[in-house]
Every structure is written in C-alpha cells, then in structure tokens.
Image: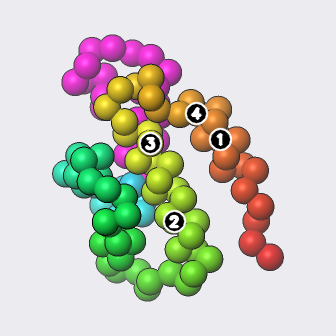
C-alpha cells in the first residue's frame, strides 16, 4: 500500500503493511483514519476500549497488556519515515520470544 503513495520499494514497506494489518485485527476493520490520528496523538491519551473490535468482550488484564504491546509495535511500524520503523526481524524476534501464558 505504501508503495502506491511513495513509488519506493524497500524492506520497510512490509513493516508498514504489518502495522496496518495488526491494527485491522485489533480494531476488527480497516483502521482508516485511525492510523494518521494515532501517529499525531499521544499514546497515553488513547484508551484501549476505543481501539478494540466492539463486537468482542473486553479482554482480561493479561490479554489487555498483550494487545497494548502489539498496538504500540504496530504504531511504530506506521512511522512516516521508513528508516525509523523497526525491521521485520526485530518484530518477529519480539513476538516469538514472548513467553506464553501459563
């Protein structure tokens, strides 16, 4: 998607797409203007309940922490400057090394 706007292809285009997809999964629909609003707002001013798919029950505390961490990661993936985005290797490592719940 980013390629359409920038006409530049690099490894960070996939990172941007991952960020959009992660937000879409959390929100339950394409994030649309949410992506632009999230980049311009302070993350502490945003409540998780406003980001979640409203068709689902509000998550327990442990799941809430996981969703917040994924959302923060997704937000980093949407940085306007591709060089400021994390690499897919970093994202993959972060997600795969997360200790599963007991």
Closer to the chain start, of discs 4 and 2, is 2
Q: State the separation of the CA atoms marked 4 and 2.
A: 19 Å
Q: Nearer the viewer, residue 89 or 24?
A: 89
Closer to the chain start, of discs 4 and 3, is 3
In the image, residue 34 above or below residue 100: above
Quadrant containing the C terminus is bottom right
Report the side of 7 relative to 56 (left or right). Answer: left
Question: What is the quadrant of residue 2 in the picture?
Answer: top left
Q: Which residues are magenta?
A: 1-22
Q: Are marks 4 and 1 in contact (CB under 8 Å)?
A: yes
Among all residues in the image, which is located at the extreme right? 102
Q: Which residue is mark 2?
A: 67
**SS category of the residue bearing label 1:** helix
Q: State the separation of the CA atoms marked 4 and 3.
A: 12 Å
Closer to the chain start, of discs 2 and 1, is 2
Q: Position of residue 81 (x, y in %)?
A: 35, 26
Q: Which residue is mark 1?
A: 92
Main SS, magenta region, reads helix
Dot 1, how many residues are within 10 Å of its Cα: few (below 14), some (14-19), or many (20+)? Answer: few
Q: Which residue is mark 3?
A: 76
Q: Is residue 28 visible?
A: no
* Residue 9 inside the magenta-drawn segment: yes
Q: Which residue is mark 4?
A: 88
**SS category of the residue bearing label 2:** helix
* Residue 85 inside the magenta-drawn segment: no
**SS category of the residue bearing label 4:** helix
Q: Which is closer to the viewer, label 1 or label 3?
A: 3
Closer to the chain start, of discs 1 and 3, is 3
Quadrant containing the N terminus is top left
Q: Nearer the viewer, residue 68 or 14?
A: 68
Closer to the chain start, of discs 3 and 2, is 2
């Amino acid at each position: 998607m980013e390629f359409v706007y920038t006409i530049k292809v690099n490894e960070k285009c996939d990172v941007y797409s991952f960020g959009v997809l992660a937000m879409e999964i959390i929100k339950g629909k394409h994030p649309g203007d949410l992506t632009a609003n999230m980049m311009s707002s302070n993350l502490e001013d945003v409540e998780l309940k406003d980001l979640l798919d409203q068709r689902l029950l509000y998550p327990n505390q442990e799941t809430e922490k996981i969703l917040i961490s994924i959302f923060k990661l997704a937000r980093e993936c949407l940085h306007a400057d591709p060089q400021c985005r994390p690499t897919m290797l970093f994202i993959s490592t972060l997600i795969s090394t997360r200790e599963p719940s007991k």
